[in-house]
Image: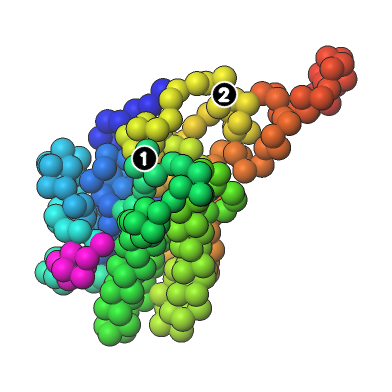
Amino acid sequence: MADHSTPSSQPSPLSGSALDGRIVVVSGAGGGGIGTTVTAMAAEAGATVIAVSRSRDNLDEHIAPLADRGLPVVPVAADSATDEGVATVLDAARRADGRLYGLVNVAGGAEPSTWMPSTRVTRADWRKIFTQNLETAFFMSSAIAAELVAAGSPGSIVSISSISGMNTAPFHIAYGTAKAAIVAMTRTMAVELAAAGIRVNAVAPGVTNTAASATYTDEDPERDLRAIAMGRRGRPEEQAGPILFLLSDLAGYITGQTLLVDGGLNLKWSHLDGDNTSLFLKDDTFRAAIRSF
């Protein structure tokens, strides 16, 4: 089911001049999943994209092919979790053609080893997850916002939260709490920056087919059918599309919001069957009748 290839050359739904003349930073661009797809789609929409990854190898594998296609993508090897990395990103943005406008915070995630009961989480575990997810997003957002305010320029910041931050996250409490904090960060920064014309929003993905998620989830279409209202996992471009919408002028009157993009995973009650009817219904005639449109 999973497709971990570099994004295709299909045109972005915002292709053309939607982001012409604008510089967009994508932090966490090199993983081959959502960040890489956002990079491709933003560039196709006209932006000059500063594609940031800690890994030069990831940039060579996933971002270089976008540049080879002629897309305006600038690969930058930097660790967004450090002040030095943020400074490197800002320097690249200042040297790029266009005006700084946007930031997409994708950098984050959690290794399979971070799944455990709350009673086993150590301070080191907790701090590592918060550094990877919350601190990286906040300090990059703060730096980009300060740059925009100093230039008197409007802009848009979009961060990746998670369905784990919108609900409970059993056996993944540090990750879920960090992603919930991104929601709070988004709302507060949106209020502070609104007068400067800077919008701040977030997207909370559900289960999405990426190389990162493949490290701790297997493929089971029947289980997906039972758990997700739309009956399948999301694709990276289905997360990148809403991110680009929030980034663009199409969302010009939206700020402080977290958009849940999960195929209806959050809508299903635990007692619902694969056809979204209650597991407690044993009368097939009744079941068929209530499913009739």
- Name the residue beneath numbered marker 1: 113
**Residue at 30% over, 80% down:** 146
Q: Amino acid at mark 2?
A: Arg
Q: Amino acid at mark 1?
A: Ser
Q: Is residue 119 magenta?
A: no
Q: On the rendered structure, is 289 left or right of 165?
A: right
Identify the main secondary structure in magenta: helix
For the N terminus, give its image quadrant: top left
Distance of label 2 from label 1 (alpha carbons): 23 Å
For the C terminus, give its image quadrant: top right
Q: Nearer the viewer, residue 157 or 206?
A: 206
Q: On the rendered structure, is 152 left or right of 66?
A: right
Q: Where in the figure is residue 269, as x and y percent of width and height? A: 71, 37
**Residue at 67% over, 37% down:** 268
Q: Where in the figure is residue 174, as x and y percent of width and height? A: 45, 53
Q: Nearer the viewer, residue 130 or 76?
A: 130
- Name the residue beneath numbered marker 2: 223
Task: Tell whether label 1 touches label 2 (CB within 8 Å).
Answer: no
Can residue 14 be seen here? The reply is: yes
Q: Residues within 10 Å of mark 2 (few under 14, many from 20)?
A: few
Q: On the rendered structure, is 186 left or right of 276?
A: left
- Picture layout, residue 17 above or below residue 237: below
- Which range is magenta? 81-88
Label number found at residue 291: none
Q: On the rendered structure, is 19 left or right of 246?
A: left
